[in-house]
Amino acid sequence: MSAIWKNHAMHLADMIKENNETKAHLYLEQLMLFPVDIQDQIIEEISNLSHCSSDAVASIINHHSIMELK
């Protein structure tokens, strides 16, 4: 994971830990213009992490930011 993803992940994880879901949604919207349903999925996956590290959060964001090729 790049340092940029880890930095974004750290900020997003802090917002979720503070139960500030609105701020987390706005951050994701500004970060990559994720649709609301994808924002919900990202927040849900981060909330369910047993160990919320920057690497784990960055991995989730990266997973949802990759376009599927068909």
Image: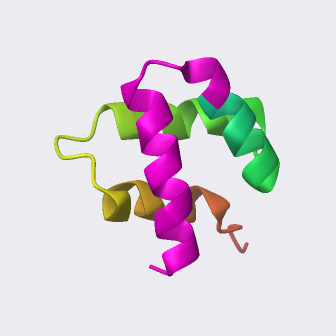
Rendered image coloring scheme: rainbow
Image height check: is 21 above or below 7?
above
Quadrant in which residue 62 is drawn: bottom right
Q: Considering the whole magenta stretch, tell me its main secondary structure.
A: helix
Image height check: is 20 above or below 5?
above
50 left or right, relative to 49: left
Image height check: is 58 above or below 24?
below
Magenta region includes residue 8: yes
Quadrant in which residue 56 is drawn: bottom left
Name the residue located 71 percent from the left edge and 67 percent from the top edge. Answer: 67
Image height check: is 44 above or below 42?
above
Name the residue located 64 percent from the left edge and 36 percent from the top edge. Answer: 39
Looking at the rendering, the stretch of residues picked out in magenta corresponds to 1-23
Name the residue located 58 percent from the left edge and 73 percent from the top edge. Answer: 4
Question: Can you say which quadrant of the picture contains the C terminus?
Answer: bottom right
Magenta region includes residue 7: yes
Q: Position of residue 66 (x, y in %)?
A: 65, 68
70 left or right, relative to 5: right
Q: Position of residue 12 (x, y in %)?
A: 52, 43
Question: Can you say which quadrant of the picture contains the N terminus?
Answer: bottom left
